[in-house]
Image: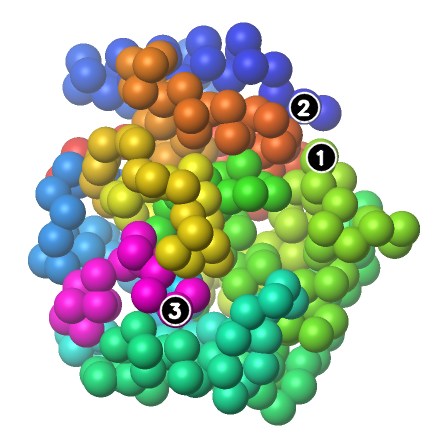
Amino acid sequence: MTISRRNFVKGSLLAAGAVAAGLSPVAAGASERAKVYFTKDLSAESLLRLYRMVNQNITGNIAVKLHTGEPDGPNILPREWVKAFLSEIPRTTVVECNVLYASPRQTTEGHRRTLERNGWTEFTAVDIMDEDGDTPLPIRGGKWLKEVAVGSHLLNYDSMVVLTHFKGHAMGGFGGSLKNISIGCASGKLGKLQIHSDGNQTWAGGPRFMERMVEGGKAIADHFGSRITYVNVLRNMSVSCDCEGVSAAPVRLPDLGILASTDLLAVDKASVDMIYALPEEVRAPMVERIESRSGLRQLSYMKELGMGSDQYELINV
């Protein structure tokens, strides 16, 4: 199943109109809607306020999954926001995994140097979850993958907060909460290879890559169950991922705000809808990036695997 541009744009523009009118962007007759909280205010205070609306089941040792970026990456989440966020939530640890592509972050040693260079170690420890190897997580209902190798330290956490800088992505079209947990928690040596390889070619993109990425994300979501929640920050959005660092394409989209939900599909769908609701000349670069990579398949396949609802109520905070 795929989503056509015509139908997706139609649905997105209807959703945008509903938001403007103060209504919920939900199809007529929908019986169950996910709650997605939204604020236009981009600040540490708003980040924490929205998190508190979706943190009901977050307990114990809490992993905070965010993209800490390549050296000197210009678009990653502000460190002062993350510092303030962590200071208000007990028993939190920022978590990452090493990467598969050529980068200082390909090794734990180089990754730690990058964390220091980017200012994270000034206020927090970062657990590189695959420092001591990986462990398999099962994927229930996977078409391409039956399990994915994640950083072994993942098992040390009771809950996960997925704190995501929403942006474009060279292979995925866009990188939201799904990409953050799927590729972000997969181990650098094996898990990321499982997701990025179609069996014949590594770095094979297109719809099958989207499906493997969704399956990897399902392993994480199923592992934590109700003890996982999602926050997307729509700020400094380039068509490039933060994995491109200083080589990222210039930011051409306006900052839009922060979205939070306990529903993975809903929070990523709402984020994409906001992009599609922008004037055509403004959204064009990101829409081209998403559609040229078959990025909307992330959303339709999440729905097929029962990973959330694409019908949501947007609640302005």
Residue 268 visible in the shown view: no
Residue at the image position 33 percent from the left and 14 percent from the top: 281
Distance from disc 3 to disc 1, alpha carbons, whole Å, reads: 30 Å
Q: Where is residue 179 in the image (x, y as percent from the top left)?
A: 53, 51
| Residue assigned mark 3 | 71
Tag 3 or tag 2, which sits nearer the N-term?
Answer: 2
| Residue assigned mark 1 | 207
Q: Is residue 51 in the magenta section?
A: no
Mark nearest the camera among 1 and 2 is: 1
- Number of on-image labels: 3
Q: Is residue 315 left or right of residue 148?
A: left
As helix, strand or loop, the secondary structure at mark 2 comes to: loop
CB atoms of marks 2 and 3 within 8 Å: no
In magenta, the rendered stretch is 70-85
Tag 2 or tag 1, which sits nearer the N-term?
Answer: 2
Q: Is residue 73 in the magenta section?
A: yes
Mark nearest the camera among 3 and 1 is: 3
CB atoms of marks 1 and 2 within 8 Å: yes
Q: Residue 2 carries which label?
A: 2
Distance from disc 2 to disc 3, alpha carbons, whole Å, reads: 36 Å
Residue 182 vs 154, above or below: the answer is above
Mark nearest the camera among 2 and 3 is: 3
As helix, strand or loop, the secondary structure at mark 1 comes to: helix
Residue 102 vs 24, above or below: the answer is below
Distance from disc 1 to disc 2, alpha carbons, whole Å, reads: 9 Å
Q: Position of residue 189 (x, y in %)?
A: 70, 74
Q: How crowded is mark 3: few (under 14 residues within 10 Å), some or many (20 or more)?
A: many
Q: Where is residue 284 in the image (x, y as percent from the top left)?
A: 41, 20
Q: Position of residue 237 (x, y in %)?
A: 33, 41
